[in-house]
Image (cartoon, rainbow, N blue to C red):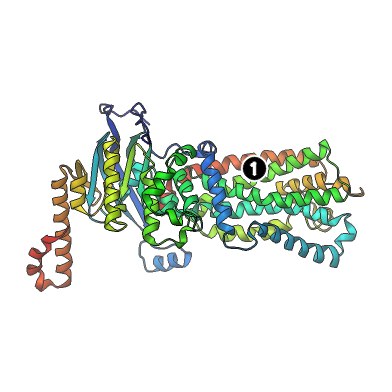
Amino acid sequence: MTVTPIRVDDGLRVPGAGGGLRRTVQNRYLLRLLVRRELRARYKGSLLGLGWSYVRPAVHFAVYFYVIGVFLGMDRQIDDFPVYLFAGMVLVNLFTETLHSATRSVTGNAALVRKVFLPREMFPAASALVSLVHFLPGFLILLGGAVATGWRPSPAGVGAAVLGFTIIVVLGFGVGLLCAAVNVFFRDLEQAVDISMIVITWSVPMIYPWTHVRTHAPGWVLDVYLANPLVSAVSLFQRAFWYPGADGGFAFPPDLYARACESLAVSVLVFIAGHAAFARMQKRFAQEL
Amino acid sequence: MTPSPEPSPAETSSIVIDRVTKNFTLRHARSIKEMSVRALRRQSLSDRFRALDEVSITIDQGETVALMGLNGSGKSTLLKLISGVMQPDEGSVRVRGRVAGLIDVGAGLHPELTGRENVFLNGAILGMSRAEILGKFDAIVEFSGVERFLDDQVKFYSSGMFMRLAFSIAAHTEPDVFLIDEVLAVGDPPFREKCLDRIRELRGEGRTMVVVAHDIKMLVGLCDRGITMRQGRVIFDGPTEEAGRLVREDRAARRTAAALADRPAAAGARTTSGESGG
């Protein structure tokens, strides 16, 4: 009863050639188990469990809110500053966590990569999905806060949110794939990636309004600043969840939507490049690890 | 793939390895500091090492083949190429059907998960679908003999229980090509006997198997054909007894060499006693 028929009719094929993202998506069952393993393993034996995914953003938020908002007075410059801050924060956290965990995904599964053939895209993909799971509670809190400050869903708002979210996910996964592959060869990368997170957090208009860059920096810095896809994505999320409830008088960067579409195009290109680089380098993973 | 010039492999072949060469680069220095120190001393930064040298093997469907040789002769590298974990530098490897390996079976088990969760996770890693795992779940658990601890985290298992669970998941994957690397060295004698029975059962179903082990007596009893490897080359391919005899010779030679290096004076006395290995 348990004997599976031997498929004599199958042709000879090259083992290990059938990888790639497509196979990863096809093998949804394994992907789901890997995501669950990641979540279970991270919180097993801790009292709070998945509750920790609330604590971390809460502490971040409290520090930014009191230091920047209250002590440094940002609260008086931006209406509903907590919602403004949090809208950017959930998105930036999603990006940095995707990057952080995807970078370590292949090296962290070294034993498996060396011993069993699986589509290697499985590991960064599972990491990215875990980040999405962690994004969800923060997002729900954001919705609660937005509703409390008078936000109601509108087609324009939903469109901005979807666009911003897509930019982050595509860009994060693309860069994550690249970093995961390069980290196999140069372990320095995971240090560099972690340091870059400090820069990322402060290089988007999440804690301060973008107009500060315009007033305090030369014109070309502003151009570079606004060309960052993360800036567009964060502005879009603020447009979606904070702007409708705020009292107006705030101008988003010029050509927000045009820049956002460019950002999306750039993100897609980064993703294609990251995926291609990963596919090329993964052939040597087993012998490098 | 380019069409190969030689006659296409028969319909019955299961694994076709064609003039495969695999090199490894051994890097002596990883950090900038180590690199500059070695560069200043004019030492080489890396060495190339040929793990497999023009290896060609064709294995038919349903054959049970023993791969033998000393440590470092390229057996495990060859298994990794067959399973697809590594790609050859030159030549080609082709297989028919689903390949699964009992290659260090513990690799897929996660210590933080329970035995039950691990059956599903490791089963899926080894290529089973959810329905297949559900169908074989009871058989896997019964075979492993860890029923009582199924809902405990695997990190609390004894090493024997750990290996038994891992082996039993892998032994129930029922692939078309089964690669077995050194896993038979695990467990107590009764469980080992059970493993061998399971392997014979799988063999009886007409699955192709490639077995790597150091226990020559066991391999002779289990396999139809033996392949002996020496320094990345196939030096013998034929009856298992003969392949095993060659490995014993290699072992004796290595022991003699070690003895010579140790005590040059006593070397003559050592050569004869070195035969009793295996």
Give the quadrant of residue A255.
top right
Residue A110's x, y, as percent? 45, 54
Residue at 39%, 52% in the rendered image: B166
Vertical relation: B47 (above or below) B81: below
Give amino acid for label 1: Val
**Of all residues shown, which one is farthest toward the front?**
B148
Q: Is residue B45 visible?
A: no
**Image quarter hosting the C terminus of chain A:** bottom left
**Residue closer to the observer: B62 or B132:** B132
According to the picture, the residue beneath numbered tag 1 turns out to be A170
Can residue B101 be seen here? yes
Q: Position of residue A132 (x, y in %)?
A: 65, 48
Q: Position of residue B120 (x, y in %)?
A: 48, 46
Residue A256, given in percent of the width and then of the height, sits at 80, 42
Chain ID of residue with mark 1: A
In front of the other: B28 or A237: A237
In this rendering, the answer to whether A159 lies above or below A94 is above
- Residue at the spot 78% in from the left edge and 40% down from the top edge: A160
A224 vs B237, left or right, is: right
